[in-house]
Image (cartoon, rainbow, N blue to C red):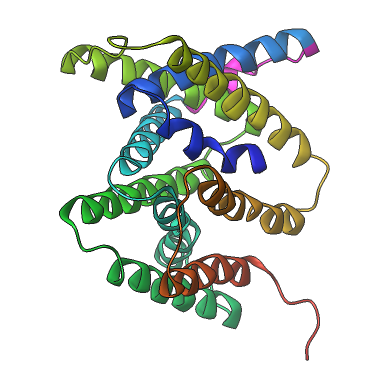
Amino acid sequence: MIIFGSIGIVVTFINMSSTGIVLMRTIIGSLFLILILLITRKTINWKNIIKNRYLLIVSGALLGGSWALLFESYNYTSVSIAILLYYTAPIIVFIISIFLFKEKLNKNKILGMLAVIIGMIIINGVSRGEGNDKLGIIFALGSAVLYSMIIILNKFLKGLSGLEITISQLIIAGIIMFIYVIIKNDKIFIDLNKNDIILVVVIGVIHTGIACYFYFDAIQKLPGQTIAILSYIDPLSALIFAAIFLSERMTIPQMIGALLIIGGNLIGQVERKVKL
């Protein structure tokens, strides 16, 4: 989670378009995970991948789009604000699930949704008010919507492990991003220096390959409730990294909004075990 939380800092120092970063991340990340599978002698269930091919294609496209919008948002608003708005995705999933899966709402989920919505409104309301800042907010929220759609689609995938899903989606996202870059004639390697290349490799290997491998190895050994709680180390560490390395300072209203978004998501995912 700490590795995931630091990606926004690395992206801001790369002189490359958002789509170019996503393209390189998906290529390097997928190749690294395939190498891990070969080293550990784990097999990929190609039969089930083919069975789920349509969902994987759509979710892979959404993954590439979500990352591209998130990375683009860093160019217009602060990493802190972008990350917080990106983490409204779980609440968007809750809302969609009410209608799509007829899921019942409990008090925790209702309180969580209200907290996140209020937090989002506060952060949007106290933004710098500049056109670029508003555009960054729109990109970040768009990224959250696409990510929530990926979560929903993943519920329909059958017979695949989390690592198989991730590798498939990375490869598909890479193919789609490559086609997009060619059509757009995006010269992603122009003006790149040695530091840019190193940072792109870092994102592909560490922030994608290693982080995903650690994550999917951990979820096989930890309860879902524990994973849900630990996942919030990601946005919290992102805020800390942004303050340390980018000197981003949040106003008091923004801090309140951050607490509402993170706390609301946490409350919404925690099931009450004891009646008070």
- Residue interval drawn in magenta: 40-52
**Image quarter of the C terminus:** bottom right
User: How far across and down, in percent of the image, does residue 68 sit?
Assistant: 34, 34
In the image, is residue 148 part of the stretch drawn in magenta?
no
Please say whether residue 171 is visible from this viewpoint: no
- Closest to the observer, 104 or 255: 255
**Image quarter of the N terminus:** top right
233 with respect to 40 (left or right): left
For this orientation, the residue located farthest to the bottom is: 276
62 with respect to 110 (left or right): left
In the image, is residue 43 part of the stretch drawn in magenta?
yes
265 with respect to 15 (left or right): right
Q: Quadrant of residue 150?
A: top left
12 to 35, vertically: above or below: below
112 to 185, vertically: above or below: below
- Residue drawn at 45 percent across, 51 percent down: 83
- Residue drawn at 64 percent across, 28 percent down: 163
- Residue drawn at 42 percent across, 69 percent down: 251
Total numbered labels: 0
User: How far across and down, in percent of the image, does residue 6 sit?
Assistant: 57, 39
User: How far across and down, in percent of the image, does residue 153 sit?
Assistant: 46, 43
214 to 35, vertically: above or below: below
Please say whether residue 275 is visible from this viewpoint: yes
User: How far across and down, in percent of the image, does residue 111 sit?
Assistant: 53, 80
127 to 154, vertically: above or below: below
- Closest to the observer, 32 or 5: 5
154 with respect to 183 (left or right): right
Q: Quadrant of residue 29?
A: top right
